[in-house]
Amino acid sequence: MAQAELESKTLISSNFPLTRKSESPLQDALRRLLRNRAAVLGGVVIILLILMAVFAPLIAIKSFEVQVLSDHDKVPEWILSVFPDMAPYARISNAYPLGADYVGRDLFSRIIYGARVSLAVAFIGSLISMFIGVIYGSISGYFGGWVDNIMMRIVDVLYAFPSLLFIILLLAFFRSPISDIEPGTIGYTFNKLDENMGGMFFIFVGIGLTAWETMARLTRGQVLSIREKEFIEAARTIGASNFRIMFKHILPNIIGPLIVAETLAIPGYIATEAFLSFIGLGVNPPTPSWGSMIADGALAIRSYPNQALVPAFALAITMFAFNFLGDGLRDALDPRLRGT
């Protein structure tokens, strides 16, 4: 009897094989992304940084611009356990969780508000780069021929000029004293806008004008590899316009590598802003930037290393988080790894 039941079950299972419900490409990519611990850690850190920047007024214990000159260079007790050489001359105050800078401003509060600058550059810079680069590269790759040759030679010329030097020259040219510019001119309008944005406008413009070349080249290569596929030819056959083919059929199939590339480029944008602030061409004081905080702390790094190392640690953690997330997205969106 038992043998008969076993044979019956075997026959049924052979006639009606069990199949697992298939996953969509997005679900498969999300599953592989969540299995990447480094990428998940990077994503969690980025989410925490975003929340910290959004709710900075609630998290910061003091205003980032308030100076208490009598509290200059004070440090909490736990700093002495990390840097015991400071014990003979350090001024102790647990009212400052990470210490105070050379004019008595709270480092913890300035770190919190400094995240706003770095994240703004990260997201707005990447959006500008993708917007310009994707449109430019798509047109170049789709039409090809002399259009492609001319557009790519322009990119080659722009590549020949150092991007960081271009941003420095741009900032030095436009950031002349507002009193020296005639009201009503474009320069006056741009300077007022930059002043109202705390010095961020020209940084966004500089990054946007120099970061899109790589995205344009990558987009062009992706479009060239897919524009002759069968489904693109079928769309042309039924009379689909170039605009519809580009945005309905081509871009959805190449957006994955573009997002990965832009995510991996974000640490470069953050580093550029930090460097510009370090040399004094970043955001306008007293708006805090991790780069300007490192520059201020570097002047007293032998005596008060916490003033330079704390913002440097925040900058490093943020850049590592975006790198980890970018690596995870690259693996998750790789079609060759689907189903693994």
Image (tube, rainbow, N blue to C red):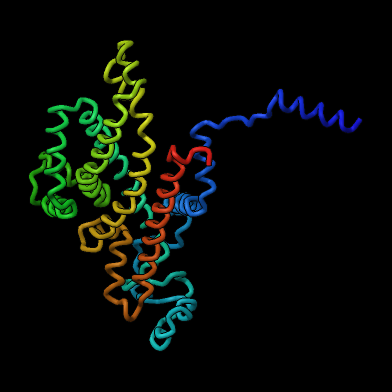
Left or right? Give the position of 65 relative to 275. right
Residue 29 shows up from this direction? yes
Left or right? Give the position of 221 relative to 20. left
**Residue at 25% over, 34% down:** 220
Between 118 and 257, which is closer to the camera in this rendering? 257
Asked if 243 appears above or below 279 in the picture, the reply is above
Residue lying furthest bottom: 88
Q: Position of residue 7 (x, y in %)?
A: 81, 29
**Residue at 39% over, 37% down:** 256
**Residue at 38% over, 29% down:** 252
Asked if 164 appears above or below 104 in the picture, the reply is above
Between 170 and 329, which is closer to the camera in this rendering? 329
Residue 55 shows up from this direction? no
Between 86 and 337, which is closer to the camera in this rendering? 337
Asked if 66 appears above or below 200 in the picture, the reply is below
Left or right? Give the position of 228 relative to 210. right
Q: Position of residue 191 (x, y in %)?
A: 17, 47
Q: Tell me the quarter of the image containing the N terminus.
A: top right
Residue lying furthest top: 238
Q: Position of residue 141 (x, y in %)?
A: 23, 30
The number of numbered discs placed on residues in the rendered structure image is: 0
Q: Position of residue 227 (x, y in %)?
A: 29, 26
Q: Quadrant of residue 282?
A: bottom left
Between 280 and 340, which is closer to the camera in this rendering? 340
